[in-house]
Amino acid sequence: MSTVEERVKKIVCEQLGVKESEVQNASSFVEDLGADSLDTVELVMALEEEFETEIPDEEAEKLTSVQDAIDYIVAHT
Amino acid sequence: MSLAGKTALVTGATRGIGKAIAKALAEQGATVVGTATSEQGAESITADLKASGGFGLVMDVSDPASVEAGLKQVSEQAGAPAILVNNAGITRDNLLMRLKDEDWSSVMETNLSSVYRTSKAVLRGMAKARWGRIINVSSVVAGMGNPGQANYCAAKAGVEGFTRSLAKEMSNRGITANCVAPGFIDTDMTRKLDDKQREAMMEVIPAGRLGEPEEVAAVVAFLASDAAAYVTGETINVNGGMYMG
Ligand SMILES: NC(=O)c1ccc[n+]([C@@H]2O[C@H](COP(=O)([O-])OP(=O)(O)OC[C@H]3O[C@@H](n4cnc5c(N)ncnc54)[C@H](OP(=O)(O)O)[C@@H]3O)[C@@H](O)[C@H]2O)c1
């Protein structure tokens, strides 16, 4: 069973089309990984699916980096 | 066949333009699911589409719960739609001074809000697949205006504006959104008009005749194809020359 961190990073790679080596915990989706606004919406939907959870819009807006996403998932699943 | 392996959802496929669209997409190889407002209507669609793997289902596009249930059924039985054709529509004509609130709201719900609901529901699947076609049946009167149809014209013009925004939002995902704007087509909708209205209509159609549902369906089939990948946010008139705006 992979850790939350590994699963989040895998989804980030798939959704944003970036290499695993480019994805650091501190990476910002928009600034470092080149996500546009639609990418971030899709990323949140993919995280919801993978972790079977609902991320409210107000929360989703705050998830700007890989670490934010990991922390959110750990706290809410 | 260019649409083989793709699921297409066509609303209002029992008769008229929607029925012709369902047939045209099935001929291109798509698995077509058509919607009706009654069981009987759904059965007649199934009878038409069975041979090509498609079927009919009951869905009221003006009812969010019904749309949700319908889309769930489509995805389970036929797979997530790659093509959505929003064709279902109604008229509740009256001069604005006499128009009832209920005439306004039912046309808005059935002709405009429905497009918002169904489009939103299919986008995720299309975004994942990096391919999608949303085709909305608008009307010549969206651009022209028409006395007695303030509700209908507002809804159809709304659909065109909606489509342009959607096209911009989704084009880098391989999803296009377009409208087809029919002029006067020979269906139940125009058969409702009286002789005087028909005569007046003929005078403004350079082609000198009503259009056939198949002539609208052919344009929808083109927009659904791979060949139309670079056409998006567009409204294509199919009106025998009556309006070219
Ligand atoms: N005919 C024209 O000259 C013309 C011109 C411009 C634009 N258009 C547009 O083209 C589209 C099709 O028109 P048409 O002439 O083919 O119309 P039609 O012959 O009157 O058929 C309307 C279709 O919409 C369905 N429908 C109505 N209300 C619905 C609802 N609440 N939920 C789901 N389905 C519903 C009907 O289903 P049931 O059979 O179950 O009632 C039927 O299949 C419409 O959007 C119309 O505005 C038509």
Image (cartoon, rainbow, N blue to C red):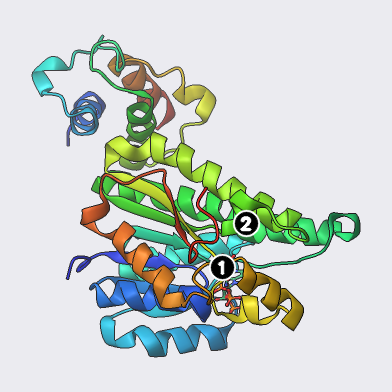
Name which residue type carries label 2: Val
Q: Chain of mark 1?
A: B
- CB under 8 Å between discs 1 and 2: no
| Crowd tier of the residue under label 2, counting other residues whose Cα lies within 10 Å: few below 14, some 14–19, many 20 or above | many
Image side of residue A27 versus residue B207, left or right: left
- What percent of the width, then of the height, locates residue A16? 23, 28
Image side of residue B147 versus residue A37, left or right: right
Q: Quadrant of residue A10?
A: top left
**Residue that carries the numbered disc 1 in the rendered image:** B205
**Residue that carries the numbered disc 2 in the rendered image:** B141
Marks counted in the figure total 2
Q: Quadrant of the image for the N terminus of chain B?
A: bottom left
- What percent of the width, then of the height, locates residue B100? 86, 60
Task: Tell me the element at label 1.
Answer: loop
Name which residue type carries label 1: Ile
Q: Chain of mark 2?
A: B
Up the image or down, A3 lies above or below B10; here it is above
Report how far apart the C-alphas of labels 1 and 2 lie in the structure: 13 Å
Up the image or down, B118 lies above or below B18; here it is above
Is residue B238 or residue B151 the one in the foreground?
B238
Is residue B220 or residue B48 the one in the foreground?
B220
Mark 1 vs mark 2: same chain?
yes
Residue B64 visible in the displayed image? no
Front of the two marks 1 and 2? 1
- What percent of the width, then of the height, locates residue B135? 42, 56
